[in-house]
Image: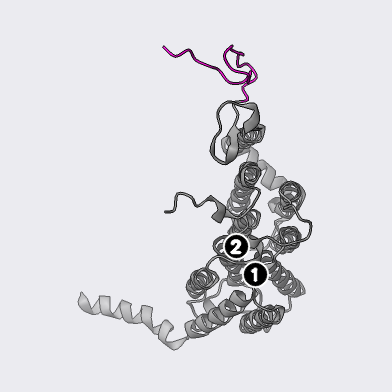
């Protein structure tokens, strides 16, 4: 009780993840929707590193494993950003808008 | 037999009854609801700007109350690093909220960079210096440059005017209810324990936990995974190039028009021009 606990960091990561979820659902701009997924990745990365630090025992591999996990999260985020933004540019060139609701012709 | 089981059950239940939860579920639900109302007001809509400022104030109020309840557990802290956690955490959450609620994508991207720097600060506090550096390099350096380029490429015609999609939100109330409901559930799960049971740091950081140790771990225990990550990145690069190379031809130069008068062309550089069509990229098959 005398210092920062694991739960402090988990709270920050959780709040960032939830804000990312809200952004992905509520916004009508493809670029901001993908920025929101990056926010979710960030929240998870904070959680992972905090777990690694606070569950650290005499075996240092716990700490390293959490960091390796975050490295792979970053790799997936980079790959996702490259592909998603390529698709966004392609979609934009066809309809001249970033609004995902312009692609609803299958809805009815 | 049954007596022992009941005794154990009572022992398990006793601390939960004696010590309340670190943060009561009711407070979490109320704060998340208040922040949700504030976020609904902050999301882009046709409302007056004053409503958005009120929404921001309401969300800020919820965040301050939540922070104050968390500060209680660190009241006796002698740790000078503790202050930085509050600064970085506040900046990260503020930036995240602005990413989601700002109307203009460029500002969203800049606020996201702010969030990345704050997260890197949190990583430094957690003694993950390499991850902090990697986060700034990869996110703020590489990924955000890509985003800003795409924002420029996809700039809507008409200069500074906001488009329909940027002025309005899609189901703001429902998505805020879902998102903040999930946040309340997760925070309840995190803080559903006695204040004394919150996990403090148990093991001090030693020198073998530095970047050198991480590198050794990555290139011995995780070698195959690291190579697979490289393969994944290469595949993503090839895929992105393939997507970006697709070209659009206007309908005038081709004999077949698709929807919207635009045809996605086959840009295979080795396609053989065949007689019977004016478009050299389009093969005409003889009707048998």
Q: Is residue A89 above or below residue B266?
A: below
Which residue is found at the position 63% from the left and 63% from the top?
A: B203
Q: Position of residue B57 (x, y in %)?
A: 68, 82
Q: Which residue is mark 2?
A: A27
Q: Badge 2: how crowded within 10 Å, few (<14), some, or many (20+)?
A: many
* Magenta stretch, overall SS: loop
Marks counted in the figure total: 2
Q: Is residue B288 above or below residue B265?
A: above
Tell me the chain of label 1. Answer: B
Q: Nearer the viewer, residue A46 or B237?
A: B237
Instruction: Say which quarter of the image contains residue B218.
Output: top right
Tell me the chain of label 2. Answer: A
Q: Position of residue B126 (x, y in %)?
A: 68, 62
Whether the residues at callouts 1 and 2 have beta carbons within 8 Å, the answer is yes
Q: Position of residue B142 (x, y in %)?
A: 74, 46
Instruction: Say which quarter of the image contains residue A90.
Output: top right
Q: Is there any visible trace of residue A45 in the rendered image?
A: no
* Cα distance in 3D space between marks 1 and 2: 8 Å
Callout 1 secondary element: loop
Quadrant assignment for the C terminus of chain A: bottom left
Magenta stretch: give its range: B267-288
Q: Position of residue B8 (x, y in %)?
A: 32, 77
Q: Which residue is mark 1?
A: B44
Which residue is found at the position 55% from the left and 63% from the top?
A: A21
Which residue is found at the position 70% from the left and 65% from the top?
A: B103
Q: Is residue A92 above or below residue B241?
A: below
Say if the magenta span includes residue B271.
Answer: yes
Q: Which mark is residue B75?
A: none
Callout 2 secondary element: loop
Quadrant assignment for the N terminus of chain A: bottom right
């Amino acid at each position: 009780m005398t210092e920062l606990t694991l739960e402090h960091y988990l709270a920050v990561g959780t709040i960032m993840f939830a804000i990312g979820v809200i952004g992905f659902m509520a916004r009508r701009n493809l670029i901001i929707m993908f920025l929101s997924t990056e926010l979710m990745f960030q929240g998870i990365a904070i959680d992972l590193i905090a777990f690694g630090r606070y569950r650290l025992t005499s075996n240092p591999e716990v700490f390293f494993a959490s960091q390796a996990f975050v490295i792979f999260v970053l790799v997936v985020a980079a790959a996702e950003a490259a592909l998603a933004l390529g698709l966004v540019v392609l979609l934009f060139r066809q309809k001249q808008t970033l609004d995902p609701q312009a692609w609803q012709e299958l809805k009815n | 037999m049954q007596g022992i089981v009941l005794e154990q059950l009572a022992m398990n239940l006793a601390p939960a009854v004696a010590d309340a939860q670190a943060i009561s579920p009711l407070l979490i639900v109320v704060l998340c609801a208040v922040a949700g109302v504030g976020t609904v007001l902050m999301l882009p809509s046709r409302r007056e700007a004053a409503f958005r400022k009120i929404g921001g104030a309401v969300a800020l109020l919820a965040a301050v109350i939540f922070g104050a309840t968390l500060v209680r557990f660190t009241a006796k802290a002698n740790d000078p690093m503790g202050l930085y956690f509050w600064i970085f955490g506040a900046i990260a959450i503020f930036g995240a909220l602005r990413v989601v609620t700002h109307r203009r994508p460029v500002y969203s991207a800049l606020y996201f960079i702010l969030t990345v720097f704050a997260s890197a600060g949190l990583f430094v506090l957690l003694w993950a210096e390499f991850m902090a550096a990697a986060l700034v390099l990869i996110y703020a350096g590489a990924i955000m440059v890509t985003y800003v380029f795409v924002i420029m490429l996809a700039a809507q015609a008409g200069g500074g005017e906001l488009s329909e999609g940027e002025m309005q939100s899609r189901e703001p109330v429902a998505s805020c209810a879902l998102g903040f409901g999930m946040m309340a559930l997760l925070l309840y799960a995190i803080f559903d324990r006695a204040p004394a049971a919150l996990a403090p740091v148990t093991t001090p950081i030693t020198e073998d936990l530095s970047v050198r140790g991480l590198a050794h771990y990555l290139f011995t225990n995780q070698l195959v995974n690291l190579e697979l990550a490289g393969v994944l990145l290469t595949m993503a690069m090839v895929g992105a190039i393939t997507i970006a190379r697709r070209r659009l031809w206007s309908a005038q130069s081709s004999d077949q028009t698709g929807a919207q008068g635009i045809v996605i062309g086959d840009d295979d550089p080795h396609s053989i021009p065949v007689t019977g069509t004016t478009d050299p990229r389009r093969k005409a098959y003889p009707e048998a």
